[in-house]
Image: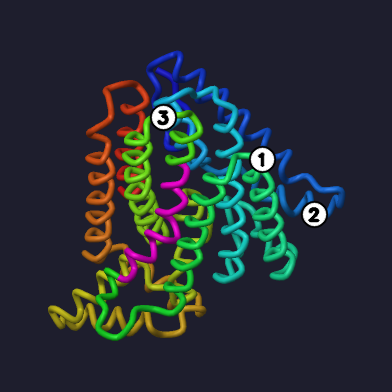
Amino acid sequence: MTVVGPFGLSVRDQALEADVQAGMTAVEEGLLEATKSEVPFITGAAQHLVRAGGKRFRPLLVMLAAQFGDPYAPGVVPSAVVVELTHLATLYHDDVMDEAEVRRGVDSANARWGNSVAVLTGDFLFARASHILADLGPEAVRVQAEAFERLVTGQILETAGPQDGRDPVDHYLDVLGGKTGSLVAVACRFGAMMSGADETVVDVLTQYGERLGVAFQLADDVLDIASDSHESGKTPGTDLREGIATLPVLRLRERAARLGLADDIALCELLDSDLTDDARHAEALRLLRAHPALEQARRDTVRYAEEARAALAPLPECEARTALVQLCDAVVHRAG
């Protein structure tokens, strides 16, 4: 039994292990090649987060989904590079919007070079992803374009907030479906599609990816509150400091409105105050870590992970399917 990929995924089949390891190595080489520029400064900025590492969650899903067709098909690795480049580009932009100082255990691009360079570097990565995508055919371009539209729409909806009368939790889950679920779904779709898998299999894996992506982000929401920077690779409570209400905060507000408990209301008031103050920020983190709202967010994470697992039911029993099921368990484990 060998450990590969993020979260210590265990692969028991030697052939699958070899395919996944070879694919991930090729993706890493492809990422470095795609981020090279004739301008050394651009290369350094574009490779900043590539070299910082990361879970490579989306490329791993491409490799596993490709097992349901021909995993050696020529479009598999390039499509994984496209998905990861797109993800990396969004990180550059997210860090500017969030004014984040740390990403993957290193200085964020905006902290090192400023917002303008970070935004333009993200754009550079989008351009390189599009260049690779053009060689994968019009259907791949359409799939990526639709996902990118959903991703941007999710980001805009998050910024705008829920409309009057809309349940904030439902709104937030829709946001996550766009911001995170869409690209994880594309990773699964590309892996199956590029490998020539049956269209039914492509659809099943796309649905799985959508649900797993939301679970993955919900686990990140929990980690942002519950972990320290050593565990998560970024500053804890970044969303709190920026006034972004993730699921633990939304569950707290929901409970405060329903039960009217003084402690809940006081914590909501603290979260609505200026959390750029380090002492207030630390106190908000401490109280949220001990609050039932965090456990409710964990249960929400488990629910989406279980939906992802259930979506795999039509697939034939095989080692790749077992690995996909293990990823559902791993996402839940991340959330504690």
In the image, 85 versus 127, the foreground residue is 127
Give the CA separation, mark 2 to mark 3: 38 Å
Q: Earlier in the sequence, mark 2 or mark 3?
A: 2
Residue 181 lies in the magenta stretch: yes
Mark 3, secondary structure of its residue: loop
Say left or right for 34 vs 90: right
Label 1 sits on a secondary structure element that is helix
State the residue at coordinates (66%, 59%): 122
From the image, which quarter does the N terminus lie in? top left
Magenta residues, as a range? 171-187
Left or right: where does residue 195 sit relative to residue 101? left
Q: Which mark is residue 42?
A: 2
Q: Nearer the viewer, mark 1 or mark 3?
A: 3
* Residue 262: % across, % down: 19, 83
Q: Residue at x 46, y 29 (%)?
A: 196
The residue that mark 1 highlights is: 31
Q: Residue furthest top?
A: 14
- Badge 3 is on which residue? 197
Q: Which mark is residue 250?
A: none
